[in-house]
Image: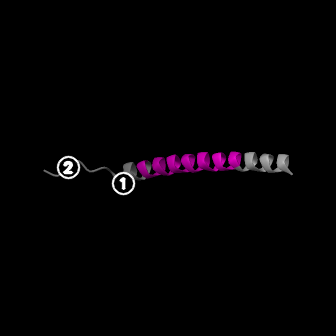
Amino acid sequence: MRPNRISFEELVDQNKQELLNDQQALDKIDDQLDEKRVKNTDKNQMIN
């Protein structure tokens, strides 16, 4: 017997969800990098 196959629409939906999850993860990383840059900028301004 062949294993159950998912439909094309289900595959598209899964891929869309994975892309959304990836985008959310990238946004989170970007936010963390921005916070780090701001902290470093603040530290540098305090030193100068």
**Residue numbers of the magenta segment:** 14-36
Label 1, on which residue? 8
Q: Residue at x 63, y 50 (%)?
A: 30
Q: Horizontal and vertical percent for residue 26?
A: 57, 51
* Viewer-closest of 38 and 18: 38
Q: If you read the primary sequence from the N terminus, does the residue marked by circle 2 or circle 1 appear first?
A: 2
Q: Horizontal and vertical percent for residue 38?
A: 75, 47
* Viewer-closest of 30 and 19: 30
- Farthest residue in the right direction? 48
Q: Secondary structure at mark 2?
A: loop
Q: Residue at x 20, y 49 (%)?
A: 3
The crowding category of the residue bearing disc 2, from other C-alpha atoms within 10 Å (few below 14, some 14 to 19, many at least 20), is few
Q: Is residue 30 magenta?
A: yes
Label 2, on which residue? 3
* Number of numbered tags placed on the structure image: 2
Question: Disc 2 or disc 1, which is closer to the eye?
Answer: 2
Q: Which mark is residue 44?
A: none
Q: CA distance from mark 2 to mark 1?
A: 15 Å
User: Is 18 on the left-hand or right-hand side of 40?
Assistant: left
The type of residue carrying mark 2 is: Pro
Q: Secondary structure at mark 1?
A: helix
Q: Residue at x 72, y 50 (%)?
A: 37
User: Is 45 on the left-hand or right-hand side of 22?
Assistant: right
- Farthest residue in the front direction? 47
* Viewer-closest of 32 and 13: 32
The type of residue carrying mark 1 is: Phe
Q: Is residue 40 magenta?
A: no
Q: Horizontal and vertical percent for residue 2?
A: 17, 52
Q: Horizontal and vertical percent for residue 39?
A: 74, 45
- Farthest residue in the left direction? 1
The crowding category of the residue bearing disc 1, from other C-alpha atoms within 10 Å (few below 14, some 14 to 19, many at least 20), is few
